[in-house]
Image: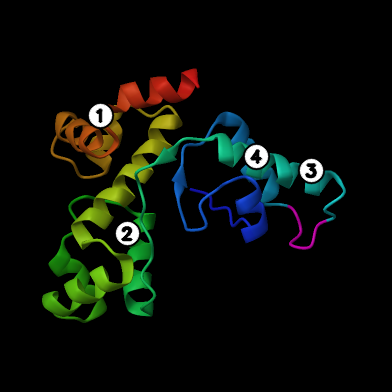
Amino acid sequence: MLNAFVSLEEAEAEQLPVHCCVYGVSALLKQLLEEAVDLPAMYDVDGRAGKLMNLLVAEIASMPHLSLHAPLPSDTRLARACRRLFNAPSITVGLDMMAAEVGMSRRTFTRLFRAQTGVSFAEWRQQVCLLTAIERLSGGQPVTRVALDLGYASPSAFSSAFRRVLGETPSQYLEARRAA
């Protein structure tokens, strides 16, 4: 997963939202993001790097906005535990496990997590799993493998969750993105 931070001026110029969002990624956008990683922070805006970054922002603006969002909490203990879940996503990681990991009661964890992310832990965990699933499926991995690796009981349980959140089955979702 790659992140792009766009200046407020650029976001407004391309009519992008001014808050964090998740977008679909075309093959071109993926290549642009991978190229941008190697650019210096203070690049020449009139040179090749500036043109690449302008194209990157324009490509982001043309991508479909996904209904996925998994913000990190600001509390360092919660953020550290959430990063671990980002690195090894699983739908089986429970609320009690996460609360114990950060040394909080279930109730405190639940209250603080929702206050800092705007969603319940279960919703957030599902978003993380689906973000990972999209990345892996886009890379050509089979649905069954992705579903089981993410801890779903079956590929159909995974497909059902995917459809409930994104409105399409994994295969429909991928086919629509390839055609775009």
| Mark 4 vs mark 2, CA separation in Å | 31 Å
User: Which kind of residue does numbered mark 1 sit on?
Assistant: Thr
> Circle 4 sits in a helix, a strand or a loop, which is it?
helix
Note whether 9 is above or below 112 in the view shown.
above
| Mark 4 vs mark 1, CA separation in Å | 35 Å
Residue at image position (67%, 57%) is 9
User: Which kind of residue does numbered mark 4 sit on?
Assistant: Ala
**Comparing marks 4 and 3, which lies closer to the viewer?**
4
What residue span does the magenta drawing correspond to? 39-43
- CB under 8 Å between callouts 2 and 1? no
Q: Position of residue 128 (x, y in %)?
A: 33, 51
| Mark 4 vs mark 3, CA separation in Å | 11 Å
49 sits to left or right of 143: right
Residue at image position (32%, 72%) is 116
79 sits to left or right of 21: left
Q: Which mark is drawn over residue 51?
A: 3
> Circle 3 sits in a helix, a strand or a loop, which is it?
helix
The 10 Å Cα crowd at callout 2, few under 14, some 14 to 19, many 20 or more, is some
Q: Pick whichever of labels 2 and 1 is earlier in the sequence.
A: 2
Residue 100 seen: no
Q: Pick whichever of labels 4 and 3 is earlier in the sequence.
A: 3
Residue denoted by label 1: 144
Note whether 165 is above or below 50 in the view shown.
above
Q: Which mark is drawn over residue 180?
A: none
Residue denoted by label 4: 58
Q: Position of residue 127 (x, y in %)?
A: 30, 49
The answer to which image quadrant residue 142 occupies is: top left
Residue at image position (76%, 59%) is 40
User: Which kind of residue does numbered mark 2 sit on?
Assistant: Leu
> Circle 2 sits in a helix, a strand or a loop, which is it?
helix
Q: Position of residue 87 (x, y in %)?
A: 39, 56
| Mark 3 vs mark 2, CA separation in Å | 36 Å
